[in-house]
Structure formats: structure tokens, C-alpha cells
Amino acid sequence: MNEISDRNTDRRVAPGRGWLALSPVIVFLLLYVAVSVILNDFYKMPIAVALVAASVWAVIIYRGHPLAARIETFSRAAGHFNILYMIWVFILAGAFATVAKEIGAVDATVSLTLRVCPPQFVVPTLFFAACFISLSVGTSVGTVVALAPLAVEIAQTVDGSVAFYVAVVLGGAFFGDNLSFISDTTIAATRSQGCGMADKFKANLWTALPAALVTLAIYMVMSKDSPAIDLVNDSNPWLVLPYLIVLATAIAGINVTVVLSLGILSAFVMGAVNGFSIMDMAGYAGAGIDGMGDLIIVTLLAAGMLGIIKAAGGIQFLLQGLSSRIHGKRGAQAILALLVGLVNLCTANNTVAIITVGGIARDIAERYGIDPRKSASLLDSASCVVQCLIPYGAQTLLATSLAGISPASPFPYLYYPWALAAMIVLSIIFLFPRRLN
């Protein structure tokens, strides 16, 4: 992994070529984010339209290659194994969420949750559950799949903001993604920096745990005056079973595709027991899969566009530009966090961002005396912050697709990533934990 990264850093990219290679991201951000901010409406500009325009621009500016070769580069990136695997997750998630909702499993789960939890503890409990599940399963995507439909139904039941409840789940999902021993980001960060997972976990706790506690406190203050909820006890408690199976198998660390398949199977069984025909439930599953169509298109477009950016030298330009502007230990740590954050912005994948900068990050850490545990913690934490905040990240796209809201809607309520970003900045300024400095 390091040899590949080091070999890439030997190839210099001229500033003009580098900025041109990065321009598709700028085009996308201007079309989607800037236009939406100007109009004060994130539903006006469809994210797919902005990505189509940026993708066309990426193909145009990828010079020195025939059109067929440019399209092939785009298609290879869009058809990468990780992208197609993600699409499988989207398809199964759409089918499970719709079948579970139509047979009453979501309503039954929400009813049980609201009966067990006092109203003022519903939001903190949802955030804690997301933190616990993501820490157990090591994947933010799996956590979103398990909790996003439940969060949407709770929001609608208590007449709350769907975007807010989705943001609660997203924040908790990235807490575990950042810390879990079996998270792919943890594996990538520790292997690239040459430290143990347990050591990186201890270093990471200094930033992630305070950020989570601050976020939890915010949610408790916000919820303290929540009114009582009147529930009609007309749901079959056995319909909670599909969700319990999904949560239990996810916490057990089973592959997310198997988790969702078991969820769909159990939903079909419970639906049949409660009088739903097989064809009705097949129709629900088909509608759920159809509902993932926009999400799949956006995922393919983003992956293809970012593939061309990397092939054109955009990522390499970022690496060489930032690594040459380092002054002192604090500056080196800040550059590590900024480097992986910007690459994550361009790749929309925190694991890929860590792998991409891993080699040069290790060189910088060794040159400026940064403990490998601290550099691994910085890479993982900073990438998770950016991945949670960008509206075109897989986790946000999946959660908002399941909720039927704009990908930018949860942004104002994402308290955890901002709290984590603040802790990263403080850890760099005050060089804590001290034993790693």
C-alpha cells in the first residue's frame, strides 16, 4: 500500500493541469451547493443533474485521450467492485425498508420504542443506539440501513423534523465507523501508519468520545421539554421481529448483504403470517428497489467523475501541494488532517482517501516526529468528518433516499462531525494526548 502511494508521489503535476483536473468537483459544488444556497432551497437543483453536468465536464477536460478512452476511464471507475457492492446494499436496503414498512414492522418497532423510552430520551437514545451499533458492526452504512427507516417513522410519529432525526443516525453511525476495530477505515489507517488497532483506538478516544458526549448533551437539552406522546396500541408486537433480526445480525458482525437478506426473508414470513400475500410483498419489494433508482444513478455518476479526476492527476496535485507546505509538528498534523479531508472530498469515500494518502502521510509523520498512533487517528477522524458532511457520500445518500428528503437536508443538524472536527483542531493545537507527543 505504501509503495504504491510513494510511487505516485514521484510524479509531479503542474498547477494548471492539477486545477483543471479538480475542476469537475468545483463545477458540481457550484451547481448543487451554491445554487441551492442562493435559492435557499436544496430541492430545486437535483443532485443527479449537477453530477451529470460535472461528469460531462470531467470527460471534456480529460485531455490527451480519445473520447472512447475517456468514457472507458469513467466507466471503469463507476463499475468498480466497491461501487457495485454498494449498489447491492442499496437494492436490498430499499426492498427491506419498504416491505417492513408496508407489513407494519416499522410502526410496531416505533410504537415499542416510544413506549419504552420517555419522550425526552428518544433522540439521545437513537443517537446512542447508532453509536453502539456502528461500533459493533464497524460500518456506517450498516447502521444507516438498520436505523434510518426507524428514525423517519419516529420523526413522523412525534411530528418532528425528518432531516434532524436522520442527522442523529448519521452522526452516531460515523462515531463507530471512526472507532470500531473492524471498521475498514481503522484497518486502512493502522496498516498505512504501522500501528496496532488497540493503540489507535486509545488515541482516537481522546477526540471521538468527547465529541460524542457533547453531541449527546446537546440532544438531551434539545429534548428536555418534549411533550408526551399519545399512542394507539393497535400494532402486533411480533412484527418487531424483522428489525430485531436485522439489529442482532448486524451487531454480530455478519456481512450487511446477509443481514438485509435475512431481514427481507423474515419480513416476508411475518407478512405471510399476518395475511399479506406473497405477490403483494413482492410488489412492495419491487417498489422499494425502484425507489433506489435515483440513488444508484447518483452513485455511478459520482464514482465515474471522481475516477477521471484521479486519472487526470487531481488527487496527486493535492498530495504534492499540501505536503510541501509544512512547518513544525503542529503544521504537519494539520496538513495530515487537511490532506485526507480534501482527498475525501474528491473521492467521496473515507477508506479510499486514507489508502490514497497513507504512504505520504507516513513519510510526513516520520519526518516530523508524529507518533503513528496519532497520525492514524488523525487520518481516520478527519476523513470521517468530511464523509459525514458531504451530501454525495454513500451514507448520506442512502439515509436521505430511505427518508425521501434532499441529501443536503440533514446538514444543519450534523452536530457530531462538527464536534469531532473541533476536537481534532484542539488536539493539534494543544498536542494531546501528551503521551503521543
Image (tube, helix red, strand yellow):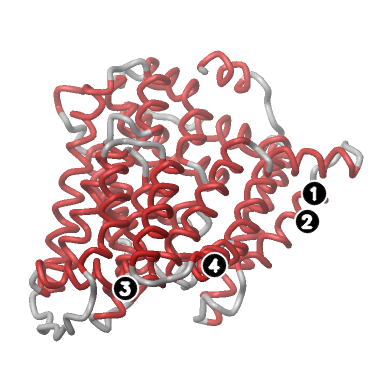
Q: Residue at x 9, y 67 (%)?
A: 116
**What residue did someone put label 1 on?**
59
In the displayed structure, 48 sits above or below 16; it is below
- In the rendered structure, which amino acid carries the disc numbered 3? Glu
Instruction: Report which quarter residue 381 is drawn in.
Output: top left
As shown in the figure, which amino acid type bears the numbered disc 4? Met
Circle 4 Cα neighbour tier, 10 Å, few/some/many (<14 / 14–19 / ≥20)? few
Task: Depth check: give the residue in front, 327 or 404.
Answer: 404
What is the quadrant of the C terminus in the image? top left
Residue at mark 3: 153
Q: Is residue 287 above or below residue 28?
A: below
Q: Dot 1: what SS?
A: helix
Looking at the rendered image, the disc whose residue lies closer to the viewer, 3 or 1, is 3
Q: CA distance from mark 2 to mark 3?
A: 38 Å
The residues tagged by marks 1 and 4 sit, at their Cα atoms, a distance apart of 44 Å
Residue at 28% of width from left, 18% of height from top? 196
**Amino acid type, callout 1:** Val
Closer to the N terminus: mark 3 or mark 1? Answer: 1
Percent x, y of residue 102: 41, 72
Rounded to the nearest angstrom, the CA distance separating label 3 from label 1 is 41 Å
Residue 392 x, y percent position in the rendering? 53, 57
190 to the left or right of 391: left
Residue position for label 2: 56
Cα distance in 3D space between marks 3 and 4 = 25 Å
- Residue occupying image coordinates x 55% and y 13%: 3
Tell me if residue 168 can be seen: yes
Q: Pinpoint residue 213: horizontal percent, then vertical percent.
A: 14, 52
Q: Amino acid at mark 2?
A: Val
